[in-house]
Amino acid sequence: MKTKKELSWERKLEQDIDHSHLTEEEWYMVGVCKPYTMTSGKRLLHTFNTVKELDKNNIKGDIVECGVWRGGQIISAWLANKTTDRDFWLFDTFEGMTPPTSADYKINPDGSKGYAHESGKAKAGYDQWCRAELQEVVSNINPFIPQKQTHYIVGDIRQTLKDPKNIPEQIALLRLDTDWYESTMAELIHLWPKVVPGGICVLDDYNSWQGSKKAFHDTFGDTIKIHTIDQVAVWFKKE
């Protein structure tokens, strides 16, 4: 008999993707990863199938995620190839969100700006917003990814990226999911140059938090073509 939690994510998944078209491997992956991510089923499938495509095209480099929550997206990347020799880099405070700035807001249905610092979650404390502690994330990931291939970079990413030893030499897949303008800018400045030709970058909140979108356009202008994953996330390629 399925638990309430299992039934809950299955209902959400049915609203998100046409699960009748999933392969057995994809269905297994989503079932494993969905409890550990707030991202959509489409975004999980995108990560999973992107890694397969990178392998197929012999694109070298590691997997990097900035803002990992409970680790679901990283697990999906590993499940795409359980024998991969790629390393997995997980950047997070593991203590919730950093404070937003005035650039961080959503567009409400009435056209007004919904500032992050005015939200109910913010009033409860940024340290409780998207909080998943390191010990929990490690316990979620350890049954899947070998410890020798995982790198947990703990702290405010605006600071941790200043240390060169925290940055891999080559990146094949870069997922940016820290929501805010300043953190996303830091990620693009320090990590995008390490993405190899043919590598993929995902901006998880492009159509959600305006600071994330602004960071992209402040970096690239309109020089890079973006592709839609779902109603929120986009991806783009290093040519």
Image (tube, rainbow, N blue to C red):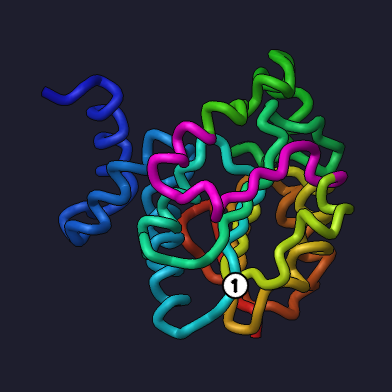
The answer to which of 202 and 25 lies nearer the viewer is: 25
Establish if 175 lies above or below 223: above
Q: How far from the left and from the top, in percent, is residue 229?
A: 47, 61
For the residue pair 177 and 181, the one nearer the viewer reads as 177
Query: Residue drawn at (83%, 54%), measured in percent from left and top?
Result: 186
Q: Residue at x 31, y 33 (%)?
A: 9
- Classify mark 1: helix, strand or loop: loop
From the viewer's side, name the closer residue of 111 and 232.
Answer: 232
Q: Is residue 217 left or right of residue 208?
A: right
Q: Residue furthest top?
A: 124
Instruction: Tell me residue 42's x, y (percent).
Output: 39, 55
Q: Quadrant of the C terminus?
A: bottom right
- Residue 104 shows up from this direction: yes
Q: Position of residue 64 (x, y in %)?
A: 62, 58
User: Residue at left 58%, top 42%?
Assistant: 68
Residue 56 is inside the magenta segment: no
Specify few, some or many for label 1: CA neighbours under 10 Å numbering under 14, 14-19, or 20 or more: many
Q: Which residues are magenta?
A: 138-159
Can residue 156 be found in the magenta stretch?
A: yes
Left or right, residue 172 beside residue 56? right
* Type of the residue with mark 1: Gly
From the viewer's perspective, is 127 left or right of 156? left
Q: Is residue 207 visible?
A: no
Picture residue at 56% right of the left edge, 36% below the top: 69
Q: Mark 1 sits on what residue?
A: 61
* Image position of 85 with respect to 1: above or below: below
